[in-house]
Amino acid sequence: MYFFKMALTRLHLTFILVIIGLLSSSTVSSDQPIPKKVMKGESVELETQNNLSFDHFEWIKDKSEIVVSYDSKTGNIVSSHERVDFNKQTLSLTIKNTQETDSGLYTARASGESDTIISLYIVTVVGTRSQGSTTESISLTWIIFLFHLGAIMI
């Protein structure tokens, strides 16, 4: 009987620790920027949740450059970029025909009674690939390296 109680207590403790771990990891990840990698010339969409009440909403690049500014009271949308679309229903930002200069940290910020950061994205625009991909050349390099070490026997 004692063994059964100890096993049940350990099971409960493990369950509680797993739940705490899941809750803490989701809290931490929401504060971390979401990586978005896009090929040069393609479009990328940055999404956010529209469940807040706010007076003013902005998408900001690299903590200083206002990409889009939206006033919910007047409905005015001001954009400093030609290649972006802003959806005022979903608050999403779409960057079209991406260039390397579009790479950076994008912040979605809502203002009202207080400023709230809703979403963070790190956008990386990569150039077009040449004939062979980087992954293929790295794999070939590792195979040659392991062959020289004697790890691969033919």
Image (spheres, helix red, strand yellow):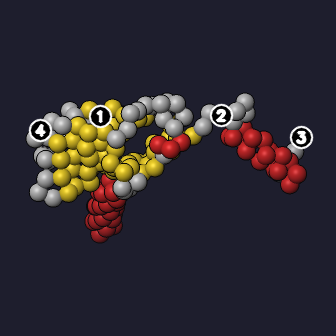
The type of residue carrying mark 4 is Thr
Instruction: Between label 3 and label 2, give the one nearer the viewer.
Output: 2
Disc 3: CA contacts within 10 A as few (<14), some (14-19) or many (>=20): few
Disc 2: CA contacts within 10 A as few (<14), some (14-19) or many (>=20): few
Q: Is residue 131 visible to us here?
A: yes
Image height of 28 relative to 124, above or below = below
The type of residue carrying mark 1 is Phe
Which residue is found at the position 32% from the left and 53% from the top? 30
Q: Is residue 45 visible to us here?
A: no
Q: Disc 3 and disc 1: Cα gap in Å?
A: 57 Å
Instruction: Between label 4 and label 2, give the one nearer the viewer.
Output: 4
List x then y, in percent, for residue 31.
33, 57
The type of residue carrying mark 3 is Ile
Residue that numbered label 3 is attached to: 154
Pointer 4 and pointer 2: residues touching (CB < 8 Å)?
Answer: no
Q: Disc 3 and disc 2: Cα gap in Å?
A: 32 Å
Which residue is found at the position 15% from the left and 58% from the top? 114
Image height of 132 relative to 108, above or below = above
Query: Label 3's element?
Result: loop
Residue that numbered label 1 is attached to: 86
Q: Earlier in the sequence, mark 3 or mark 4?
A: 4
Residue that numbered label 2 is attached to: 129
Instruction: Between label 4 and label 1, give the one nearer the viewer.
Output: 4
The type of residue carrying mark 2 is Arg
Disc 4: CA contacts within 10 A as few (<14), some (14-19) or many (>=20): few
Left or right, 66 with reference to 73: right
List x then y, in percent, for residue 88.
22, 34
